[in-house]
Image (cartoon, rainbow, N blue to C red):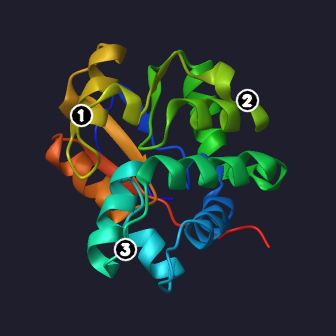
Amino acid sequence: MQIPEGEFEGFIFDHDGTLSLSMHVHFDGWLDAFKKNGGNFEFTRKIAQSYAGIGMHDTVRILNDRFGCDMNPDQVVSDQESYYFANLDKVIPYEPVVNFARQCHHQGKPISVASGGIRETVMRTMEAIEIVELFDVIVTQDDVENSKPAPDLFLLAAERMNVKPHKCLVFEDSLLGIEAAKNAGMKSVLVSPKDPE
């Protein structure tokens, strides 16, 4: 994990795939939800990763357009979340990033979470892997209008930390998230964890 040069005053962390190794559980949840809702297309890891950072309801709408389906976004998301919560014990923290966040927390540096996930899911996952107490600022898709690659999540996190955007460093696992950081005028670190077996 290469930290870029710069005098950073605040640190913003994506959640899924960055602080927590949860993408494999989310992926299986999507497969389960699509099957239940008539999504008879091939959903691959590559497709899933290409939409990482986009809000869940928006993801279903995009997939409907892409594959000519008529899935109900609310129902698909509800089914996906039910699967995810039933398998929450399979999610673990991604230690290199969590340890960096802990270090910042102990040094009193402003840190925040900016996730394209739904607030309840993000909070329950953070509680499950015991990192929620590190963060005073947690921003989710529920708090903004536009998903990544729009800069909304990161700009709101910076505002709530009271740190200027160009003084923030973003940690992300998705290219859409990296693009969102760039759109917010922030430097970023691309993390590439492997899913647990």
Marks 3 and 2, how far apart at CA: 35 Å
Question: Residue 145, which numbered label?
Answer: 1
Residue positioned 55% across, 50% down in the render: 16
Q: How many marks?
A: 3
Residue positioned 29% across, 77% down in the render: 66
Identity, as a three-letter code, of the amino acid under mark 1: Glu
Identity, as a three-letter code, of the amino acid under mark 3: Cys
> Which quarter of the figure has residue 184?
top left
User: Label 3's element?
Assistant: loop
Neighbours of disc 2 within 10 Å: few (<14), some (14-19), many (20+): few
Marks 1 and 2, how far apart at CA: 25 Å
Can residue 91 be spotted in the picture?
yes
Q: Is residue 112 above or below residue 94?
A: above
Badge 3 is on which residue? 69
Can residue 3 be spotted in the picture?
no
Marks 1 and 3, how far apart at CA: 24 Å
Residue positioned 35% across, 70% down in the render: 63
Q: Which dot, 1 or 3, sits closer to the camera? A: 3
Residue 115 located left or right of residue 132: left
Identity, as a three-letter code, of the amino acid under mark 2: Glu
Neighbours of disc 3 within 10 Å: few (<14), some (14-19), many (20+): some
Badge 2 is on which residue? 127
User: Label 2's element?
Assistant: helix
Residue 135 located left or right of residue 157: right
Instruction: Of the two numbered discs 1 and 3 on the same chain, state the one appearing first in sequence.
Output: 3
